[in-house]
Amino acid sequence: MHSLVVFASGTGTNAAAIIGWFSRNIKARVSLIVCNRPNAGVLDIAKDKHIPYLLVNKQTIEEELLLTQLASCNPSMIILAGFMWKLPEHIVKAYTGKIVNIHPALLPAYGGKGMYGHHVHEAVIAAGEKESGITIHYVNEEYDEGNIIMQARCLVQPTDSPDDLAARIHKLEHFYYPRVIDFLLPDRL
Ligand code: GRF
């Protein structure tokens, strides 16, 4: 069975979708959740699902110990699901080609530093875009610049608030992210 490590900072609805998908599919399981916010909703999900979690701060995320803790999970993939910090370079190097992220817009548009959460949807609406969507991509040393794995689109309605658009995009994320991860994992370890 593949082991997956999820990094998340927020409510964790994507983490929940991934955990749910692989609870019905024995190909993989989430073996660790790494989080930088002690009050993040994703930690409630971890506790509820009995998944070990690790809280990191600006210092511990840089330490070799985290690399050792990750290695002990032997992850086939590291999944960023709303993790607010850039991963340290040594982690990206250690897991090149095995780290994926989801972005709530059609990269390369509306990506980069500061483009997260409602900022993305506000910018998309302010620009009068007719469509937005999600991008699942590999992670490299730069924000939102790794190779794109897949994108899915949705319409932006003229009356949309950022929350309306966020809700539509979350639906796309919850549908596609678990399936894309599943697709990327080799059938055999
Ligand atoms: C998602 O919209 C994702 O695209 C972005 O962060 C958000 C996380 O949401 N990277 P949630 O915590 O999974 O609900």
Image (cartoon, rainbow, N blue to C red):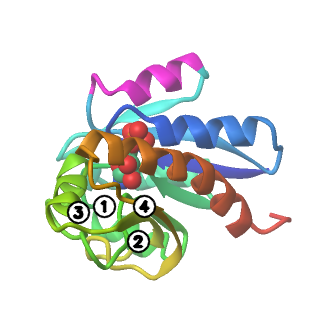
> Residues at badges 2 and 1 in contact (C-beta under 8 Å)?
yes
Compared across the picture, whether 45 is left or right of 31 comes to left
Whichever of callouts 2 and 1 sits on the residue coming sooner in the sequence is: 1
Element on which disc 1 rests: loop
| Marks 1, 4: nearer the viewer | 4
**Magenta residue span:** 38-48
Q: Residues within 10 Å of mark 2 (few under 14, many from 20)?
A: many
Circle 3 — which element? helix
> Which residue is at the far front?
158
**Residue at (29%, 39%) from the top-left corner?**
163
Residue 110, how many percent across, how many down? 24, 69
Residue at point 26%, 48% (across, down)? 117
The residue lying furthest to the bottom in this view is 147
For the residues bearing labels 3 and 2, Cβ distance under 8 angstroms: no
Q: CA distance from mark 1 to mark 4?
A: 32 Å
Residue at mark 4: 155
Does residue 44 belong to the magenta stretch? Answer: yes
Between disc 3 and disc 4, whose residue precedes? 3
Q: Is residue 91 above or below residue 55?
A: below
Between 119 and 44, the one nearer to me in the picture: 119
53 drawn magenta: no
Mark toward the start of the polypeptide (1 vs 4): 1
Label 1, on which residue?
87
The label number, if any, that marks residue 124 in the structure image: 3
User: Badge 2 is on which residue?
Assistant: 139
